[in-house]
Image: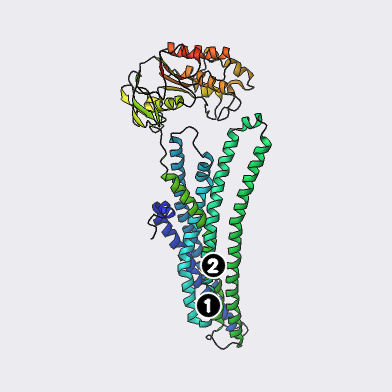
Amino acid sequence: MSDSRPDPLRALLAPVRTAVTQGSLLSLASALVWPVQAAVIAAALAALVEADGVGHGPIAGWVAPWPAALSVLALGVLRAILSQAAEARLFDAGDRVVAERRAAIVTREARVARAGAAGPGAIAALAGEKLDTLLPYVLRYHPAMARSAVVPLLILGLAFWHSWAVGVVLLMAGPLIPVFMALVGWAAQDASARHLAGLGSMNDLLVDRLAALVDIRLLDAGARVTADYAASAETLRARTMRVLSIAFLSSTVLELFAALGVAMVAVWVGFSLLGVIAWGGQVDVRSGLFLLLLAPDYFQPLRDLSAAWHDRAAAQAMARELAAWEAEDSPLILGSGRVTARLAGAPEIRLRGVTLGAIPIPDAVIPPGAMVGVTGPSGAGKSTLLRALAGLDRPTAGTITVCGQTLDDATADPWRATLGWMPQSPRFPPEPLHRIIAADAPLDRDLLAMAALTPVLARLPAGLDTVPGETGAGLSGGEARRVMLARLLHRRPTVVLADEPTADLDAETARQVTAALLELAARGATLILATHDPALLAHVHQRLTPGQPA
């Protein structure tokens, strides 16, 4: 039973199929110029040799040295122009596909509704070096296929026309190359797939270890982690060398077949011109030189195809991985992530029959200006509920209504424009603290003090000019959340979603953070706080406990 599934590599190149075909035909046209050049060169050299037996005497017509040289030069220029046009067309086609797929990966992964996307290293490898394997495939494999389908047959026909013996030599040596290439291709394809998979795993491992660097140092596990990483790197090195060994082995054998074929043609032509061999067809100096010039180009397209066969194996492995990624049913955040105007209307929130995964959420109405505590044990779904209220996770069932409208793709972006988000593990852009907190607005020192951020800034050498790492490197977890609190105080959001805002804080700092949150509430903001802090919960107006039915 045949496999009816579409070839993922063919589907990937479908939008640029015409450009790839045009580039391949231009490459073929460039290769077909050489037999004409070879004929001119052979005729000119034969005329020089046969003029009077020693290369002297009058030579007339287009085979005279200067007209022949100019003809060869003009044909060479034509060949170069065709080759450059082919490469330009093929590169543009391949680069377009790579750019479009890379943009699609980045766009979708930026909207995947999961905290800490699984396998970020593998996704980065797919969008980076793995996608780049498509360019060599388009640039080399497709034109090599076009050339190998036409050029060897043309040269074989010319060889039989001049000498059946040379034709037989080429006919015997030529098919060995694609047969051996197919045998090696099976092993190369499997080795390339394992190599690309190992590359993604190594990237995932590196991202995971970098994220846990502080914990690794605290646990004094550096030596063990380094040893584990070295073992993984050694495995990847072995896989890489396996791919290279297959490539070098196949190239060596194919070069051997090509060299033997050219050598046999040269021996037969030489002995035939000396009169030692009288069978296989009569050749003169011109036809002998012509056959000698054509023999290497009979094998060249097949050698090019053999070299590009490994590019094909790598591209196929990448295309299958890309197709698997595209087939994943990854839930996306609501909206497009664009910055828009705020959603009009009073920020009332209603939950009706909401289920997040397998977690039921009690029905509730949260009026504007309310202070709500989201409670429950760790893992009960408090953070998941906050993400759903922000439109970052889609409810499995039920509806969330905000400002009198259903929270969906149309309303999520303007709704998020009204929100202030204080996650448990903040992420920071590569900007100094003063821009993170206040953007281009002037900083309010009183608000910094209200967020208990003043002592944090005092200990930082660059103060407000400090650029924290993406995950808050240089700041503790509590300090990073205080930066987010200062940002909230400056931005004056209508609704605040805070996840464990007082966790990891000493009693005095927790008191200051609580006071700052109460100040936001006093300004009229709706506060929805996921917390275990009894001091903070003492101020809430209502409570929501995920996992409890309505």
Q: Position of residue 480 (x, y in %)?
A: 55, 23
Cα–Cα span, label 2 and label 1: 41 Å
The residue labelled by disc 1 is: 63
**Residue 412 versus residue 383: which sits nearer the camera?**
383
Q: Quadrant of residue 271?
A: bottom right
Q: Position of residue 180 (x, y in %)?
A: 54, 67
Q: Is residue 142 above or below residue 220?
A: below
CB-based contact (under 8 Å), mark 2 and mark 1: no
**Comparing labels 2 and 1, the label whose residue is closer to the camera:** 2
Q: Is residue 422 above or below residue 110?
A: above
Can I make out residue 163 in this image?
Answer: no
**Residue 6 versus residue 466: which sits nearer the camera?**
6
Element type where label 1 sits in the image = helix
Label 1, residues with CA under 10 Å away: few <14, some 14-19, many ≥20: many
Tag 2: amino acid:
Phe
The residue labelled by disc 2 is: 180
Q: Quadrant of residue 51?
A: bottom right
Q: Position of residue 280 (x, y in %)?
A: 53, 85
Element type where label 2 sits in the image = helix
Tag 1: amino acid:
Val
Can I make out residue 221 in this image?
Answer: yes
Who's the residue at 63% across and 84% down the image?
Answer: 54
- Labels 2 and 1: the sequence-earlier one: 1
**Residue 384 versus residue 326: which sits nearer the camera?**
384
